[in-house]
Image (cartoon, coloured by chain):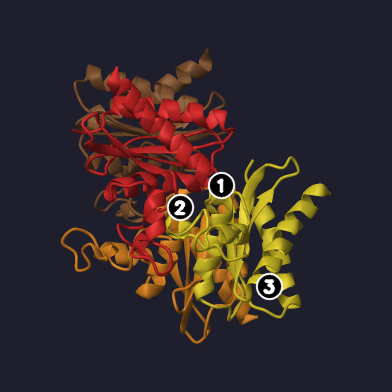
Chain colours: A yellow, B orange, C brown, D red
Amino acid sequence: MNLSLEQAETAIKAAKEKARQLSCLQNIALVDAGVNLVAFARMDDAWIGSIDVALRKAKTARYFNMETGELGKWSQPGGPGWQIEHSNGGLITIPGGIPIKNKNGEIIGAIGASGSTAENDHAVAQAGADAINSAASL
Amino acid sequence: MNLSLEQAETAIKAAKEKARQLSCLQNIALVDAGVNLVAFARMDDAWIGSIDVALRKAKTARYFNMETGELGKWSQPGGPGWQIEHSNGGLITIPGGIPIKNKNGEIIGAIGASGSTAENDHAVAQAGADAINSAASL
Amino acid sequence: MNLSLEQAETAIKAAKEKARQLSCLQNIALVDAGVNLVAFARMDDAWIGSIDVALRKAKTARYFNMETGELGKWSQPGGPGWQIEHSNGGLITIPGGIPIKNKNGEIIGAIGASGSTAENDHAVAQAGADAINSAASL
Amino acid sequence: MNLSLEQAETAIKAAKEKARQLSCLQNIALVDAGVNLVAFARMDDAWIGSIDVALRKAKTARYFNMETGELGKWSQPGGPGWQIEHSNGGLITIPGGIPIKNKNGEIIGAIGASGSTAENDHAVAQAGADAINSAASL
């Protein structure tokens, strides 16, 4: 099963709302199960460099089926995934990328958010992922 | 002046409606005056290869401030823009990329659409661009 | 539904047999529905440059859900897909890339073959695709 | 002397068996003495991001004729190979890439495996390399 555009738009709407609550400006990207882009939105005046960061966070989360911040723990100096960021044309292992699962627990895509602190980026991505799961449960 | 996310979302909504009228599946991308991505949407089951084509059409239209199909006439064998597609990391000069202007005639960004024939792609992009201008005129 | 490794290995075996019948040396690649590599084989002494060509043919066939040779007709000078090869990091529109469908007609991946004439490359890819469908029908 | 497709397929078969013993899902790649791809296999549901990691591990092992984990010790902060990962379009220096020698001790290629912990990846690659040597010694 694959992330739909309707689900991606639901996530973007929720992510933007969360960003406004946190008073930050975000770029939000969603990829499907095959790591292909489904939807993207950049809030006005958000960091331009975060366009690519958000895209790569979403891809990284699906490439390895884990939150980007978790992969970033592995890739530290001396760690078991040292310099894995050099693969796949460039990964981003900063928090803010989260896999998205359906109600059967299968990964159907991922969301990436970038534009503020790692904490805010993660919270915004989580809000997007949660909105898909909430909508699915209705 | 720069294309806003609200304008880009207005364009995507209109472009999707046009695609449904034409019974085709489209990828739609919008860039701002600085040729940086603002918003993107892929309709479910649209060609995966058209993600990148739509992005490049939008960028190409703003890079040279003209419709992509116009640039494609120049880039033909023997033409004055022969092989210009090799610049900027790869241009797409197929119809479906259109600059977006504000009511003062200033270019504020561009839209790119891809997923069907060149005619359909252009019509979908035009519907998106028109929706921004209609909203602006109110 | 997605191409499995077992299906990909079935295709590679049949493609190699076809290549031997045609007295040519082939590179054979298979991607899944998400355009991600599943399997690859290079026959001994096959063109080294055809490694990448085979990979790109498989990707191109899935990117646009059509045989690469068909896309190559569109991308000729003056054609509606002129220079589309500049998208997606470089397409190959020479014959030898073929989408693979399941028995419900859904595209589950694609095969690409390269190493000889366009006719031979296409025949080898077709033999690989046919082997998957034959195995599925049992 | 160069790694043959038959040897590469022998290695992939053994590597897949080792992965099943270790209850992990692997991507396995083999390159020849010229650092060109010979064969690749992705087990169903293995990490998509590990396609590229496996390819780069195999290449890295042959580029420098050493196990990728050894090179990763050199590339740590303050080390003699600091940031060597930036060369050759991106190296991967995580364990799981191993040079393959013939019975005369000459390097004929390399294998890379990715999909689990560094320990599992290395064990899977080693099983593949050993299978070639076992077959050669008969």
Q: Nearer the viewer, residue A130 or A61?
A: A61
Q: Are marks 2 and 1 on the same chain?
A: yes
Q: Position of residue A56 (x, y in %)?
A: 52, 61
Q: Position of residue B45 (x, y in %)?
A: 56, 45
Subunit ID for the residue under disc 2: B
Q: Position of residue A79 (x, y in %)?
A: 52, 57
SS at mark 3 in the image: helix
Q: Residue at x 29, y 45 (%)?
A: D62
Count residues near mark 3 (Cα–Cα under 10 Å), then give few for <14, some for 14-19, many for 20+: many
Instruction: Give the residue furthest to the left.
Output: B78
Residue B11's image quarter? bottom right
Q: Which residue is mark 3?
A: A120
Give me the C-alpha separation between circle 3 and circle 1.
40 Å
Residue A129 placement, left or right of B5: right
Q: Which residue is mark 2?
A: B50
Give me the C-alpha separation between circle 3 and circle 2.
32 Å
Residue type at numbered disc 2: Ser
Residue type at numbered disc 1: Ser
